[in-house]
Amino acid sequence: MNKVLSQAANKTAEKTGQVVLIIACSETDSNMYYASQFLAPDPFIFLRAKGYSYLLMSDLEVDRARAQAEVDVVLSYSEYEKSLKKKGMAHPEIIEVVHALLKEKKIKEVVVPPNFPLEYGDGLRNRGIALKIKPEPFFEERLIKSREEISAIRKTQAAVEEVMDEAVETLRQTESKGGKLYLKGTVLTSEFMRHQMHYSLMEKGYVAQHTIIACGADACDPHNVGSGPLRANKPIIFDIFPRSNQSRYYADMSRTVVKGKASAGVKKLYNTVLEGQNLGIALVRDGAHGKMIHEEITAFFEKQGYHTGKQDGRMQGFFHGTGHGLGLDIHELPRISKSDWVLQKGEVVTVEPGLYYPNIGAVRIEDMVLVEEKGCQNLTTYPKELEIN
């Protein structure tokens, strides 16, 4: 998969003749990882110019980069430092080293991502280098997922579904006492279950953070991870979005369950969200407008009597986007929301409507789909069942 991605990352630069410069840490910057296919904890330099791709690496990483990175040339940072010291520069900073590289390649203008450090941008401009900031998607090729990328997302999703199965089995083993759920005599909490799920994912080769296991009032705040005892007969939202240690690709799934019996109000809420999600999935296709899909779901909820707005000082109803792209980032373009985006064949997006009412409960259901010419393929296979007994 590495060579496929690195070639894709450099395709636009080759066509346009633009010089691409990134200075970032590939463990936290997905554009850097996409371009170099090299994982490192500290910032390094990527340059694409005149048909060639370069990495400028410290002595600590230069040999590993030459063995692993998917670029044409890996250069030694310290060699450029030595050259500048010979010219009388006592302690060359990173911007002097980058400028030396650009000067050597006779480059006077570079295209940088929107998160390019201001300090480096000012330093280059002060040395006569023109910068053009390209907004996301910085590498447009990242939008359209290759066969290898889709396979990686599917593999991560398989792990998500396994741990969700484990969570449901844990809930099955609980007993209700005073409205709280007990597992082997101990109150089952959001924190305990999140720890168990994270540990299981880690053993499978995935890292999860901020997994949402939210019950009751917590669930009515869509990004509240949840805390305290889990309760019987109340909706619990699970939102699981780990990243693979091997491929670096994410998956994302939400399910809402009730251990015991759901109230009539929660059942109606759940069925409405499920119908809204089915509507959204049916509308996803190449050329569809994300804004239109979002508005159709919103209108459907309103028609069912579920209004969105502030009540008693907090938002209620459907007040987040319908979906987002994902891949090397958990949230990346495209969007299915109030901000319009025309979907393209090969994009992977979530469809995750939700309804939130403190006096009733909260429900969110989320699948990942692959945009196709005349519809979409659902990459999520996990069942949608409300009650667990």
Image (cartoon, rainbow, N blue to C red):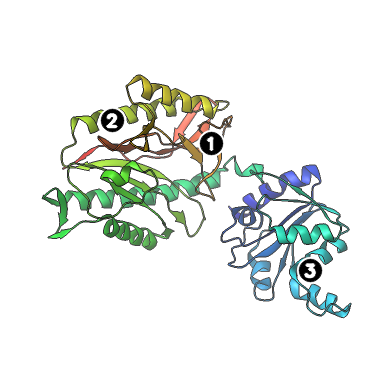
Residue 97, which numbered label?
Answer: 3
Does 32 appear above or below 251? below
Name the residue that disc number 2 marks. 269
Mark 1 residue element? strand
Foreground residue among 117 and 155: 117
Foreground residue among 235 and 283: 235
Q: Nearer the viewer, mark 3 or mark 2?
A: 2
Q: Residue furthest top?
A: 303
Mark 2 and mark 3 in contact (Cβ < 8 Å)? no
First along the sequence among labels 3 and 2: 3
Mark 3 residue element? helix
Q: Amino acid at mark 3?
A: Val
Marks 3 and 1, how far apart in space? 38 Å
> Residue at point 84% right, 77% down?
89
Q: Which of the 4 image quarters holds residue 120?
A: bottom right
Q: Quadrant of the C terminus?
A: top left
First along the sequence among labels 3 and 1: 3
x and y percentages locating residue 313 in the rendered image: 36, 38
Q: Amino acid at mark 1?
A: Arg
For label 1, the crowd category at 10 Å Cα-Cα, with few meaning under 14, some 14 to 19 and many 20 or more, is: many
Does 5 appear above or below 44? above
> Residue at point 47% right, 36% down?
323
For residue 71, side relative to residue 363 (left or right):
right
Q: Which of the 4 image quarters holds residue 125?
A: bottom right
